[in-house]
Amino acid sequence: MIDPRFPARLLEDLSEPRTIAGPRTRLNLDRWGDESDELPPGLVPFARDGGGGVWYLDVEDRLKKGVGAVFYLHMSETYGDTRYMASSYDELLQRVSEGLHPDDMPSFDALASRQAPKGVRVPGIEGLVDVERIHASTGRPALVTVHDNARCEGGFVARAGTSVYMTDAGRIHFVTLAERAVVDGIPCAGDTVLAPHPMTGRPLRFTPAEPIVVDGIPLAPFHEVMVEDPIYSPGMSGVLARDHDVEGLPLAAGTPVHFLHGSLFNGTLRADANVAGTPLPAGTSFELANGVLYRTRPPAT
């Protein structure tokens, strides 16, 4: 993206887009990039690194490093992963030529976490914790270690000495359970991991303490279950609690099953069946990819 507030040298370089390469990274100058939803307005993209990373120039001093400061953020990352790279475009070019790599610079989250407090209390968790990482965007804890078994918002108990991951809004999204808990109506086994949905609290990853039916699929207890979510989980998985037909295929009890975007990915047959146009005998394990038979394993002898 070309912004008239860019420094003259950058405007000149963007007039004929090219690649500026250093020993460890590069700038593919780009006139058409979009601003990031993770960064405030005024952080204008001007180059990519060829691996998903984007270079931004702060034309309004929104991040308080001075007008013209350069920042780096990968397209898959969030605000806290942003890195301050240089005070100006000229300085960036010099540093890149000397071997600078984005990973050499600390992220905003890493900087915010340098003085993370220990032996404190945080909202949503009873008892003392050590804060290991902080969300730069909100100042809230991102990762804590609980000293003792600690009851958490949601009614479950985190196991002593384990890590609890929290969103920038202060919601728990990963925890190790100290004991059996009923979460959103689902009985979850103790000494297993639980990943609640960051917004709703609905379990997305858990180990049921009793048989459970998810999207019509009967799943066995004490085997980890993943639940599909359009943002946080692309598929559903578990172990069949009993013989069950899935998409017309006769699958055997005890079969690990995975669904990707609602379609069966794998299973083990309890009877002869035609799988994606291929006849397979009972006991065969198979994998599908976009409805095409990808791999099979013959029945155990």
Image (spheres, grey):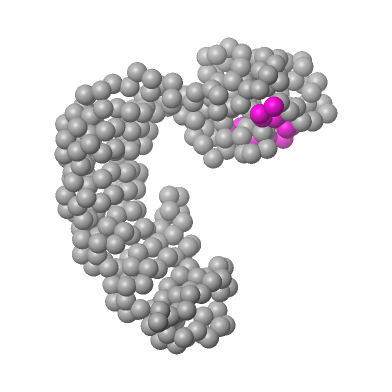
Where on the picture, by quarter, is residue 228?
A: bottom left
Whether residue 295 appears in this view of the structure is yes
Q: Magenta stretch: residue 242 in it?
A: no
The image position of residue 93, as x and y in percent, is 70, 19
Where on the picture, by quarter, is residue 5?
A: top right
> What residue is at 21 percent from the left and 27 percent from the top?
121
The image position of residue 94, as x and y in percent, is 70, 16
The image position of residue 61, as x and y in percent, is 57, 15
In the rendered structure, the answer to whether residue 243 lies left or right of residue 87 reads left
Quarter of the image containing the N terminus?
top right
Which residue ends up furthest to the top in the rendered image? Answer: 66
> What residue is at 79 percent from the left and 30 percent from the top?
18
Quarter of the image containing the C terminus?
bottom left
> What residue is at 35 percent from the left and 78 percent from the top?
252
Task: Give the main secondary structure, helix, strand or loop, of the magenta stretch.
Answer: loop
Q: Magenta stretch: residue 29 in it?
A: yes
Whether residue 41 appears in this view of the structure is no
Magenta stretch, residue numbers: 23-36
> What residue is at 40 percent from the left and 21 percent from the top?
112
| Front-most of residues 295 and 210 | 295
In the rendered structure, the answer to whether residue 217 lies left or right of residue 185 reads right
Placement of 7 over or under 262, stated as above or below: above
The image position of residue 234, as x and y in percent, is 46, 56
| Front-most of residues 196 and 258 | 258
Placement of 274 over or under 26, stated as above or below: below
Which residue ends up furthest to the front in the rendered image? Answer: 301
